[in-house]
């Protein structure tokens, strides 16, 4: 839903102004009258209902306890946020699960559920600009969320544990969250599971402790992270912990898969591939590296979960290593994760660059040059499907991936290699830890290259006829 305030009829607008003046002049006005509810979603038409308005989350401190045999999760979340308007109440997204207590700044708060919304009314209104913390205690059997183009997502109960994963959302199945990439935050995540099982998540691993037959795994992500990039993988995994380029690297493969199988061999090149990309995109943006392979066939995709992508089993079905998918998910650490979309209509900024990274890797490995891959896709592309604003049902379509990558290469041809890589590095440096839109990218590309490029981006991103290939001068 979108507020309709921009489309008020003139007569009604005048009446509203008169009413506002009358109210403002009324000495008996309620002193709390300024406080108003935060919006129940962020107004992104690709994900109706997702995210909320009225505040900006800075940090999530999550403590979850999961028992695989009963599929029961109990959690405590402390959400630190800043009010972006005077708030009488606000929403968090939470799918299923029962909330038993909510507090705001240490005082008990009223709460109710409205579908996937948790509506919190603090004892007192929250002033605009004030920092507040919300404590939520909750429990239950977590559920899945349908991410139709990608297959199953949300919280999947597996044979030996669970996998929480999914784009464009999944986080609300295991913690209360402002579930939209426009509100990034840092995270501390503690997961308690039965001894002998691993509990993998995002960021730098912390100390592990055991008590009463249960082990608590600790993870900390200090770079702002979009909520759909959080993950939780619980089960019997072979976990490898090491150091790469001075930072922790954690990879994991299910114990049931061979130690030298294609998953392990592919993930073992994570550090090397991240270095290859860093030479082209700028410094690796996070404090840790890694990756997790899962064997549950419901995960029909790989996802660039921050600092630790998760790879579904389909990529290794041939029995051969798959480095292309590792390149793709690691490229997202710059394009999609460190610099996230503000609205899903711009998802080509994620997928176009991750696909282009695969082209670069293939060339680097002595395979087809990027120019050759460009020519191949240029010949087969359906130009009637736009890359920018493809529509929610096509957000994972080939216009986003291949046409997005064609656009990236067209830019390279138009500005030359030196300006092209300078543009990529400027984008990842200037927007590191934040968000960006297509307009922001075009503006930056024009500034760095000194060329006018809006016509090029219009034609390559959403023109309906085959665009002319820019000829380098
Ligand atoms: Zn991708």
Image (cartoon, helix red, strand yellow):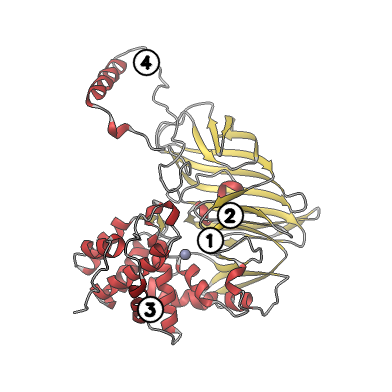
- Which mark is on residue 107? none
Q: Is mark 2 within 8 Å of ligand 1?
A: no
Name the residue beneath numbered marker 2: 153
Mark 3 → mark 2, Cα distance in angstroms: 32 Å
> Considering only order in the chain, which callout, 3 or 1, is on the residue closer to the N terminus?
1
Name the residue beneath numbered marker 4: 29
In front here: 225 or 470?
470
> Considering only order in the chain, which callout, 2 or 4, is on the residue closer to the N terminus?
4
Left or right position of 209 against 76: right
Which class describes the residues within 10 Å of circle 1: few (<14), some (14-19), or many (20+)?
many
Q: Residue furthest right?
A: 212
Mark 2 → mark 1, Cα distance in angstroms: 13 Å
> Considering only order in the chain, which callout, 3 or 4, is on the residue closer to the N terminus?
4
Label 3 with label 2: CB-CB less than 8 Å? no
> Considering only order in the chain, which callout, 1 or 2, is on the residue closer to the N terminus?
2
> Considering only order in the chain, which callout, 2 or 3, is on the residue closer to the N terminus?
2
Give the answer, above or below, for where 13 lies relative to 411. above
- Which mark is on residue 305? 1
- Which mark is on residue 373? 3
Label 2 with label 1: CB-CB less than 8 Å? no
Q: Please name the residue shown 52% across and 72% down the image.
A: 326
Mark 1 → mark 3, Cα distance in angstroms: 27 Å
Question: How many numbered markers are drawn?
Answer: 4
Left or right position of 41 against 160: left
Q: Is label 4 or label 1 in front?
A: 1
Q: Please name the residue shown 41% across and 53% down the image.
A: 344
User: Residue 447: x percent and y percent?
Assistant: 23, 64
Q: State the image quarter where residue 32 is shown.
A: top left
In front here: 132 or 136?
136
User: Residue 180: x percent and y percent?
Assistant: 47, 48
Q: Quadrant of the N terminus?
A: top left
Q: Is label 1 or label 3 in front?
A: 3
């Amino acid at each position: 839903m979108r507020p309709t305030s921009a489309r008020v009829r003139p007569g009604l607008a005048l009446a509203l102004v008169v009413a506002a003046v009358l109210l403002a002049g009324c000495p008996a006005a309620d002193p709390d009258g300024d406080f108003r509810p935060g919006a129940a979603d962020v107004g992104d038409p690709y994900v109706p209902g997702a995210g909320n308005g009225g505040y900006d989350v800075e940090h999530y401190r999550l403590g979850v306890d999961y028992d695989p045999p009963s599929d029961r999760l109990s959690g405590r979340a402390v959400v630190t946020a800043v009010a972006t308007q005077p708030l009488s109440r606000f929403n968090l997204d939470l799918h299923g699960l029962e909330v038993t207590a909510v507090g705001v700044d240490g005082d008990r708060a009223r709460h109710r559920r409205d579908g996937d919304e948790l509506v919190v009314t603090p004892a007192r209104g929250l002033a605009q600009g004030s920092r507040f913390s919300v404590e939520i205690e909750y429990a239950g059997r977590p559920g899945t969320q349908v991410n139709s183009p990608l297959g199953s997502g949300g919280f999947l109960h597996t044979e030996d544990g669970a996998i929480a994963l999914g784009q464009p959302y999944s986080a609300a199945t295991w913690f209360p969250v402002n579930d939209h990439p426009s509100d990034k935050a840092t995270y501390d995540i503690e997961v308690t599971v039965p001894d002998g099982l691993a509990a993998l998540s995002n960021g730098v691993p912390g100390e592990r402790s055991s008590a009463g037959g249960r082990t608590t795994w600790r993870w900390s992500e200090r770079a702002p992270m979009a909520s759909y990039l959080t993950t939780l993988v619980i089960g019997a995994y072979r976990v490898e912990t090491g150091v790469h380029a001075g930072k922790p690297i954690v990879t994991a493969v299910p114990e049931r898969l061979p130690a030298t199988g294609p998953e392990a061999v592919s993930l073992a090149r994570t550090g090397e591939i991240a270095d290859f990309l860093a030479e082209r995109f700028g410094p690796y943006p996070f404090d840790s590296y890694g990756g997790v392979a899962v064997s549950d066939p419901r995960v029909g995709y790989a996802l660039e979960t921050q600092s630790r992508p998760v790879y579904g089993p389909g990529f290794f079905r041939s029995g051969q290593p798959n480095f292309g998918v590792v390149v793709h998910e690691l490229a997202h650490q710059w394009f999609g994760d460190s610099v996230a979309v503000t609205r899903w209509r711009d998802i080509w900024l994620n997928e176009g660059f991750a696909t282009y990274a695969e082209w670069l890797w293939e060339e680097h490995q002595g395979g087809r040059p990027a120019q050759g891959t460009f020519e191949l896709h240029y010949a087969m592309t359906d130009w009637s499907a736009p890359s920018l604003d493809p529509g929610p049902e096509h957000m994972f379509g080939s216009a986003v991936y291949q046409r997005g990558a064609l656009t990236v290469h067209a830019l390279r041809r138009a500005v030359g290699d030196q300006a092209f890589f300078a543009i990529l590095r400027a984008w990842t440096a200037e927007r590191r830890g934040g968000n960006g839109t297509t307009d922001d990218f075009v503006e930056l590309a024009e500034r760095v290259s000194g060329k006018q490029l809006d016509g090029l981006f219009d034609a390559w991103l959403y023109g309906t006829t085959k665009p002319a290939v820019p000829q380098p001068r």
